[in-house]
Image (cartoon, rainbow, N blue to C red):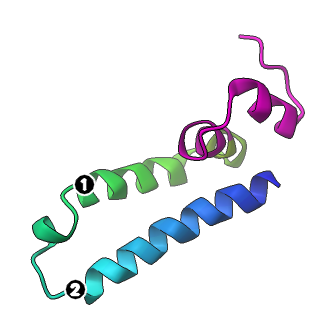
Amino acid sequence: MVTVATNLAIDRHRRRRRLSSLVNEPLALVDVHMSERIDLARALRRLPRRQREVVVLRYLADWSEKDVALSLGVSAER
């Protein structure tokens, strides 16, 4: 399930990138946050797989810390 959520988030990012390239408007008008999204995608790719799963589920999928921990089979304690 975690892999599915991660792949869905990556697919969503790729779809948005493809759609923006189809538009004939300047990039600044298409999506003012595109450079931030690109930076985020690059940063996520640099993380080890397990850390990337945590970040995607916690912040992009908006799961609670408890749900992320349960899904990954780890403790939610800090």
Residue type at mark 1? Answer: His
The residue that label 2 is drawn on is 23
Of all residues, the one furthest to the top in this rendering is 78
Q: Secondary structure at mark 2?
A: loop
Which of marks 1 and 2 precedes in the sequence?
A: 2
Q: Is residue 23 left or right of residue 9?
A: left
Q: Amino acid at mark 2?
A: Val
Left or right of residue 65: residue 10: left
Crowdedness near tag 2: few (<14), some (14–19) or many (≥20) residues, C-alpha within 10 Å? few
Residue 22, percent across and down?
Answer: 28, 89
Q: Is residue 78 above or below residue 41?
A: above
For mark 1, give the secondary structure: loop
Please say whether residue 73 is one of the residues in the magenta stretch: yes
Please tell me which residue lies in front, 1 or 43.
1
Q: Check the image and report above or below for 24 versus 68.
A: below
Span shown in magenta: 54-78
Quarter of the rendering occupied by the N terminus: bottom right
Query: Quarter of the image holding residue 75?
Result: top right
Which of 66 and 55 lies nearest the eye of the viewer?
66
Position of the C terminus by quadrant = top right
Q: Which residue appears farthest toward the right when viewing the image?
A: 73
Q: CA distance from mark 2 to mark 1?
A: 16 Å
Determine which quarter of the picture holds residue 53.
top right
Query: In the rendered image, which residue does mark 1 sit on?
Result: 33
**Residue at position x 77%, y 12% in the image:** 77
Residue 7, percent from left and from top: 66, 64
Is 27 situated left or right of 2 in this image? Answer: left
Q: Residue at x 63, y 65 (%)?
A: 8
**In percent of the image, x 78 and y 19: which residue is there?**
76
Where's residue 68, x and y in %? 75, 34
